[in-house]
Amino acid sequence: MCFCYLCKKNTMMKNIDVEIYLNELKSFFEKNPNDLNILIGDSLKSRFFEKVKERCLINAENGGEISLTQKQIIDIVVEIKEEEVSQGKKLILYKVFEKNKVGVFCLN
């Protein structure tokens, strides 16, 4: 690991870029709270944004785009949901039985 001035400056710029991206993402979800609720459900917003920041920093260290791909966001949501399930929080399925003109069927 290099500790020269240029490397430190480059790392600081990447961190600033990550913070800018994170602030833009937060402001988008503040303007569109239903989108965040659809994305993460009842999960903690703070935990979601922590994971996003971690993933952005990893992307920056690897020299890639700081912004997350759709797959990376889905992976974060799945990871958070898995943590909740492992902590004993039960997932609730809504509308297991669906009614239509033919009859009632189970979405199992």
Image (cartoon, rainbow, N blue to C red):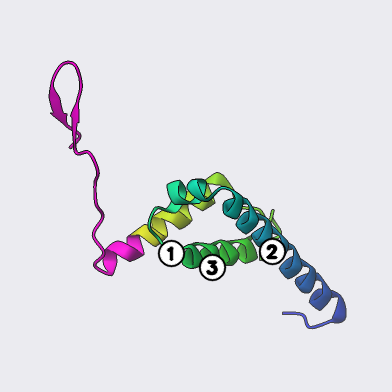
Image disc number at residue 18: 2
Q: Earlier in the sequence, mark 3 or mark 1?
A: 1
Instruction: Identify the residue at image location x=56%, y=47%.
Output: 32
Res 23 quadrant in image: bottom right
Say which residue appears at 54% left-offset and 63% top-offset: 49
Q: What numbered label is drawn on residue 44? A: 1
Magenta-colored stretch includes residue 99: yes
Q: Closer to the camera, 26 or 58?
A: 26
Q: Secondary structure at mark 3?
A: helix
Up/down of 33 relative to 83, above or below: above
Q: Position of residue 47 (x, y in %)?
A: 47, 67
Extreme residue in the bottom direction: 3
Tell me where residue 36 appears, x and y as whole percent: 50, 51
Neighbour class for label 2 at 10 Å: few (<14), some, many (≥20)?
many
Cα distance, mark 3 to mark 1?
10 Å
Specify the amino acid type for callout 2.
Val
Magenta stretch: give its range. 82-108
Q: Earlier in the sequence, mark 2 or mark 3?
A: 2
Q: Which residue appears farthest toward the top when viewing the image?
A: 102
Quarter in which the C terminus is drawn: top left
Tag 1: amino acid: Leu
